[in-house]
Amino acid sequence: MTKPNEDQLIGRATTHLTRCWSGALVHCDALSSLEALRDKASKAGFELGIASSFRDFDRQRLIWQEKINGCRPVYSASGERLQVSELSGDELLSAILRWSALPGVSRHHWGTDLDIYDAAAVSADYRLQLVPEEYEEGGPFYEFSRWLQLLVEEGQACGFFYPYLQDEGGVSPEPWHISYQPVAGDYQALWSYERFEQLLNDDCWPLSENIRSRSEEIFVHYVAPMIKLSL
Ligand SMILES: [Zn+2]
């Protein structure tokens, strides 16, 4: 096992990654367990598809920038599209935080976390939306999701778990997001409020003034739940 370094923690390095069968980048130490999970899924009649895995700092920052510029939709907590020009900086910040991790703070930086679906349940040209309805009863990935959740409960999911299954108020539930705990735990352990403050000072962030003035509240409500830190 390789211990994470600073750059790997915040998505500024790719040295901890390797490509899996789909070409997606995953953490070197998570690959064999991911392949084992894929094989289990396959035996149960599913095909583990990867919608998204590693994402770097700049990619996450671009997502934020596009939401601020209005090039990407911004939604309210209840899922209605918001008019960016009508929001104050603080309102915009809160709305984006509900759906997107701040750059440097995403579990997707670690290579241990993936957004998955059942590729056997849909046609090759299906447009994946990653919305809860696709994973709930009546949705194409319901059976797969139920199967894997049960496997996680039984401790048979090769080290993977669902970090965002419940709505805990800050971060919205993501029934498609799984994490490889044996490695993710090492990354998680490096996180603290001090590190967050340091990150805020180091970089030019979108809406940085708003973030700095609310840094404690943002850490408690959005960063800690994102990283799964218990405060
Ligand atoms: Zn995700």
Image (cartoon, rainbow, N blue to C red):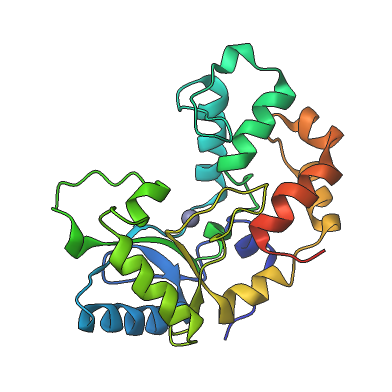
Left or right: 68, with 40 as reference point: right
Against 113, residue 139 (above or below) is: above
* Residue in front for this viewpoint, 124 or 29: 124
Left or right: 210, with 91 as reference point: right
Tell me which residue sits at (29%, 53%) in the image. 139
Query: Can see residue 219?
Result: yes
* Residue in front for this viewpoint, 110 or 147: 147
Count of all numbered marks drawn on residues in the image:
0
Could you tell me residue 184's position as x and y percent? 59, 73
Tell me which residue sits at (83%, 56%) in the image. 193
Against 113, residue 130 (above or below) is: above
Query: Can see residue 206?
Result: no
Against 44, residue 163 (above or below) is: above
Picture quarter containing residue 6?
A: bottom right
Q: Considering the image in quadrants, where does the N terminus appear? A: bottom right
Left or right: 174, with 199 as reference point: left
Left or right: 79, with 141 as reference point: right
* Residue in front for this viewpoint, 156 or 200: 156
Q: Considering the image in quadrants, where does the C terminus appear? A: bottom right
Picture quarter containing residue 49?
A: bottom left
Could you tell me residue 125's position as x and y percent? 15, 46
Tell me which residue sits at (62%, 49%) in the image. 171
Could you tell me residue 153's position as x and y percent? 50, 81
Q: Residue furthest top?
A: 86
Q: Residue furthest front?
A: 137
Tell me which residue sits at (50%, 33%) in the image. 79
Could you tell me residue 205's position as x and y percent? 69, 36
Against 45, residue 52 (above or below) is: above
